[in-house]
Amino acid sequence: MITQAKLINYASNFLNSEIENIEKLLKDDSIDDVSRDILNKLLKTYKQDLEEMEKEIY
């Protein structure tokens, strides 16, 4: 069985990676406005989720 701490660590690593990828995509001028809006919403959600998980760890 995977411990809660290990799951939080996996999720944290995933979110950090996704945040970095989204931030790179948002720097691309060829991204259309609809996609940019979706990416910004995902980025906000991922950052909030990561912040909540970090509270659980510390």
Image (spheres, rainbow, N blue to C red):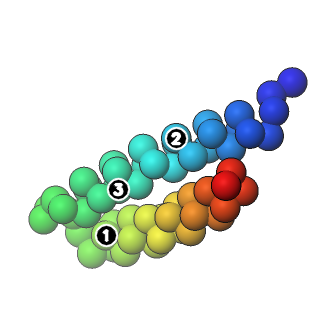
For badge 2, the amino acid type reads Asn
Label 3: few (<14), some (14–19) or many (≥20) C-alpha neighbours in 10 Å: some
In percent of the image, x 45 and y 48: which residue is there? Answer: 16
Q: Nearer the viewer, mark 1 or mark 3?
A: 3
Quarter the N terminus occupies = top right
Earlier residue among tags 1 and 3: 3
Q: Secondary structure at mark 2?
A: helix
Q: Position of residue 50 (x, y in %)?
A: 57, 58
Q: Position of residue 34 (x, y in %)?
A: 34, 73
Q: Nearer the viewer, mark 2 or mark 1?
A: 2
> Which label is found at residue 36?
1
Label 1: few (<14), some (14–19) or many (≥20) C-alpha neighbours in 10 Å: some
**From what the image shows, is residue 40 above or below residue 49?**
below
Left or right, 5 with respect to 40, comes to right
In percent of the image, x 50 and y 64: which residue is there? Answer: 47
In the image as oriented, which residue stretches furthest toward the right? 1
For badge 3, the amino acid type reads Ile
User: According to the image, label 3 marks what residue?
Assistant: 22
In the image as oriented, which residue stretches furthest toward the left? 29
Q: Answer yes or no: is residue 10 visible.
A: yes
In percent of the image, x 44 and y 65: which residue is there? Answer: 43
User: According to the image, label 2 marks what residue?
Assistant: 13
Q: Secondary structure at mark 3?
A: helix
Q: Quadrant of residue 7?
A: top right
For badge 1, the amino acid type reads Arg
Left or right, 18 with respect to 24, comes to right
Earlier residue among tags 3 and 2: 2
